[in-house]
Amino acid sequence: MTTPRPPGARRGGDRGAAAVEFAAVLPVALFLMLIAYQGYIASTTVERVENIARTGARQASQHYDAGRCRAYAMTARPRWINDYRIQGGAARVSGEDAVYCRVDAKLPLLWKGVPLDVKVSRTVTMPLG
């Protein structure tokens, strides 16, 4: 005959179950956090590239100097955007003089070995003056 267990007593076979569950869930949780962080980096890159193009076109337009679009855009570029190309110059829109600024940047990735070549391109055109 076996003796009954006192109330609230656990079986010996459940020992360490929480640690096993934690060890199983931790890699999935970390992977999801890295994916979320990469999404944040992507959205911030798109916003920054738009801001660079807008700043370059706006400053060149205000100073009536279409050739300086690249120089003005460089002042708005954050240091963490390393792989980029900025073009700018004069344009005609509806018969009026304008200036354009185009920025192409490569999306920074957390994993260096991943062969993703995602580029963000934004073009802003503003009238002179």
Image (spheres, rainbow, N blue to C red):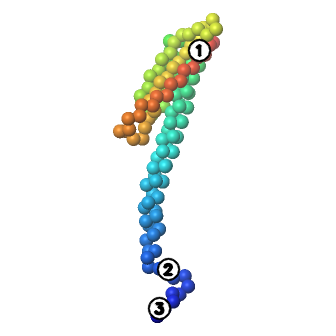
User: Which numbered disc, 3 or 2, marks the residue closer to the eye?
Assistant: 3
Q: Amino acid at mark 2?
A: Arg
Residue depicted at x 45% and y 69%: 17
- Image coordinates for residue 88, horizontal then vertical, percent: 50, 15
For the residue pair 108 and 10, the one nearer the viewer reads as 10
Secondary structure at badge 2 equals: loop
For disc 3, the marked residue is 2
Secondary structure at badge 1 equals: helix
Q: Amino acid at mark 1?
A: Ser
Q: Which mark is residue 61?
A: 1
User: Can you tell which quarter of the image residue 79 is in?
Assistant: top left
Quarter that holds the C terminus: top right
Residue depicted at x 46% and y 58%: 25
Q: CA distance from mark 1 to mark 2?
A: 76 Å
Q: Is residue 45 above or below residue 1?
A: above
- Image coordinates for residue 55, horizontal then vertical, percent: 56, 23
For disc 2, the marked residue is 10
Residue depicted at x 56% and y 85%: 7
Q: Give the mark, 1 or 2, whose residue is nearer the N terminus.
A: 2
